[in-house]
Amino acid sequence: MKRSLLVEGHGYPLAVVVAAANRPDDQLLDATVAALALERPEPEPDWPQHLCLDAGYDTPTGWEATIDLDYYPHIALRRPEERLPTPDPTPPARRWVVERAHSWLTRWRGILVRREKKPENYLGLLQLACALLWFRYYLALAPSLRA
């Protein structure tokens, strides 16, 4: 079982997709971005939308999908010593944000130990957990919003 998770800058989930464990990460990119709960704003030329990905997306399919979706890619390279240096230094991908979101999701026992037979039921449980993460974030932020 593989979870593909799209998070915002602070690590709160925006989209989640489940698939078989033998599917490569780059093949799930289109489905993950399509699963966004909110409508994505149009990218503007002077304000590009960035997408940070790990080395599993360093394939032609991953690069093409990122560019086709109008994102500015930040993809960790699989073998950086074999590649030529880029003309402008790009900041490293911030993968720890996604890892933290996966850690938050595995705090629920039903997600950590999967007992659902159908992937639709497991996806529903993941979406409920993502909604609860956003609800907790709102409760923690609510006192500052009231002032």
Image: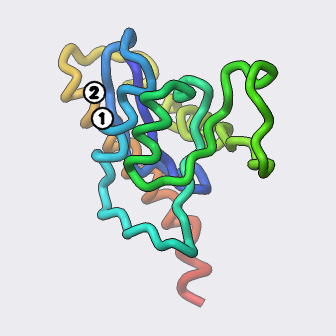
CA distance separating discs 1 and 2 = 5 Å
- Report x, y in % for residue 137: 53, 60
- Report x, y in % for residue 111: 40, 26
What mark, if any, has residue 122 been given in the picture? 2
Q: Nearer the viewer, residue 124 or 20?
A: 20
- Residue type, label 1: Leu
Residue bearing mark 1: 125
- Secondary structure of the residue carrying numbered label 1: helix
Q: Residue at x 52, y 61 (%)?
A: 49
- Residue type, label 2: Tyr
* Residue farthest bottom in this picture: 147
- Report x, y in % for residue 77: 67, 28
Q: From the viewer's perspective, is 120 left or right of 1?
A: left
Q: Nearer the viewer, residue 52 or 7?
A: 52
The quarter in which the C terminus is drawn is bottom right
Say above or below: 49 vs 35: below
- Secondary structure of the residue carrying numbered label 2: helix
Q: Residue at x 30, y 55 (%)?
A: 37
Q: Are marks 1 and 2 in contact (CB under 8 Å)?
A: yes
The quarter in which the N terminus is drawn is top left
Say above or below: 5 vs 58: below
Q: Residue at x 49, y 66 (%)?
A: 138
